[in-house]
Amino acid sequence: MTDTDGAPTTSGHETVHLLRALIVQLDLFGAEFAAEHQLHSTDVRALISLLDAERAEQAATPGWLGRQLSLNSASVTALIDRMEQRGLVVRERDGSDRRRVIISVTDRAKKLGWSFFGPLIGQATDVLESFSPTQLETIGEFLTKMSAAVEATRGSQAPGD
């Protein structure tokens, strides 16, 4: 398929397949990180969620983390215990509400992640710099809408529906 200038275009289905292939590659990359550092895939997803919360300046509580990962309270406690023992996260009391516990990623975990994922982040940044601001806006809109589509589909296919 080509556009009016004769340049190849990609259909919706082809784009979905390209996105799926990228997701598989990223998942394999994350699995390599997990294996290299003897982490469970849930540990890696938890670290990503906690780092995202930190970037968004959002307090990450055990309940919040459980919702992000679809884990029950006991599983979240075991996850946090395991990660705390490995020096990847710390629990701290919330300064404004001592009953609330905040989970943070340690500097050690950030360095570990950066040493592995840094080169990929650099490559991805280089690729993105090849796009115009308008294209980057379109890419951002696409990714936002795709994330919403996945979330909506997951919600509609929840057990018991």
Image (cartoon, grey):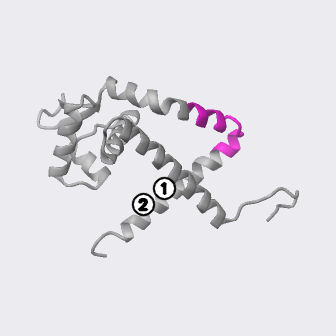
Magenta highlight on residue 123: yes
Which label is found at residue 151?
A: 2
Looking at the image, is 23 positioned above or below residue 120?
below
Question: Residue at horizontal 34%, vertical 35%?
Answer: 37
Q: CA distance from mark 1 to mark 2?
A: 6 Å
The magenta stretch spans which residues?
122-136
Which label is found at residue 147?
A: 1
Looking at the image, is 111 positioned above or below residue 35?
above
Give left or right: position of 108 versus 100. right
Q: Are dots 1 and 2 in contact, CB under 8 Å? A: yes
Residue 118, percent from left and from top = 50, 29
Residue type beneath disc 1: Ser
Residue 105, percent from left and from top = 30, 31
Most common SS among magenta residues:
helix
Residue 24, percent from left and from top = 51, 53
Question: Residue at horizontal 30%, vertical 51%?
Answer: 69
Residue 4 occupies which quadrant of the picture? bottom right
What kind of element bears circle 1? helix
Residue 153 versus residue 87: which sits nearer the camera?
87
Magenta highlight on residue 134: yes
Residue type beneath disc 2: Glu
Give left or right: position of 38 versus 9. left
Residue 33, percent from left and from top = 41, 38
Q: Residues within 10 Å of mark 1 (few under 14, many from 20)?
A: few
Quick one: which residue is furthest to the right in this view? Answer: 5
Q: Residues within 10 Å of mark 2 (few under 14, many from 20)?
A: few
Residue 20 occupies which quadrant of the picture? bottom right
Q: Quadrant of the N terminus?
A: bottom right
